[in-house]
Image (spheres, grey):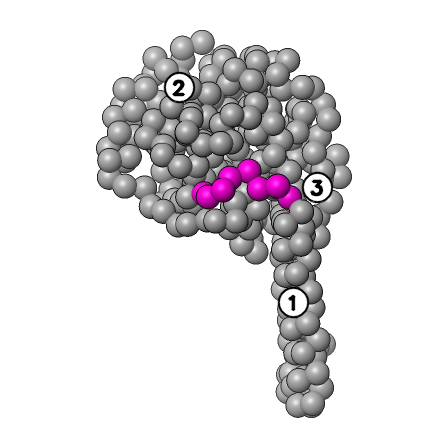
Amino acid sequence: MAVIPSGVENGATGEGATWTGRPKAERAGSERIKSLEASEEARDVSTSLDMTTRLFASLHVCHDDIPHSAALNMAIDEALLEQAAVPSIRFYQWHSPALSFGYFGIFADVARYAGERDLVRRWTGGGIVFHGDDLTYSIVIPVSAAAFGESPTSIYEKIHRALCTVLNANGASAVIAGGVEPGRSGFAKGAAATGGGYSCFENPVHADVMIDGHKVAGAAQRRTRPGLLQQGSIQGVDLGNGLADRFAKALSGNCSERKINEEILNRARELTQRKYGATAWLRRR
């Protein structure tokens, strides 16, 4: 997967040249221009976000910087949903290249990757997603949150519109896809599509995020009595420049950092052994 690199300045000009610096007045003028440009960009981003109706009044943000196995990552998401009190978003990593496939997926469709990737069946729907170079996140919305009252399709679209706002503020041309209505493939019931033998990023559906005709963000949901879980992946774009935090702030103007507590981790370990790490779950279809 190609990732658009960030620009890097190089001070040397010409082979073997030594940069001795510009005149002080010229450097000062240049710095003022850069400062003004940065301020203008910040105001533009703020204005764009102000124009976006934020989905959450407040949002807990967790940067889970410890890479986990695929099974434990799925288990943590379910444990967070079970104990959710306020909307939260978790950004997480994988300890090795991984592949997740939807609840209704067929194991035979992914079995050939077992020797090269950590395989896991998601609790949410959808198709095959390759993980490792992506920005993976989960959003949990408890039943008590106002946003839970919206339809799953509306939530999906609003989350992705917030992401589009952030990507476009950084110079991209991100749009919301038309495509197939997710509800027609069982998405509203927690299965973004029937069957799991296709790559999610080769098959955009309604409200996925697109840049130049290519899907760069998709997700799947699970709706339960405690709340709603959305698991998403962002790939094929510059994942630096604070993308995760800017995405969170586009979802809510009141973000606060949180860590995963031991109670959640203990429950996740239990779910890993009993469910996500079990052969019966992986090969159930």
**Residue, x 27% and y 41% (percent of image)?**
261
The kind of residue on which mark 1 rests is Ser
Q: Are marks 2 and 3 in contact (CB under 8 Å)?
A: no
- Residue at the spot of label 2: 225
- Residue at the spot of label 3: 174
For discs 2 and 3, the disc positioned in front in the rendered view: 2
How far apart are labels 2 and 3 at the CA level?
A: 34 Å
Residue reaching furthest right? 212
**Residue, x 61% and y 14% (percent of image)?**
185
Magenta range = 52-59
Decide which of 21, 242 is in the foreground and name it: 242
Q: Are marks 2 and 1 in contact (CB under 8 Å)?
A: no
- Residue at the spot of label 1: 39
How far apart are labels 3 and 1 at the CA level?
A: 23 Å
**Residue, x 66% and y 61% (percent of image)?**
43
Q: Secondary structure at mark 2?
A: loop
How far apart are labels 2 and 1 at the CA level?
A: 45 Å
The kind of residue on which mark 3 rests is Ala
Residue reaching furthest top? 285
Residue 91 at x, y = what percent?
45, 42
For discs 3 and 1, the disc positioned in front in the rendered view: 1
Circle 3 residues within 10 Å: few <14, some 14–19, many ≥20: many
Question: On screen, 88 above or below 99?
Answer: below
Residue 125 at x, y = what percent?
51, 19
The kind of residue on which mark 2 rests is Arg
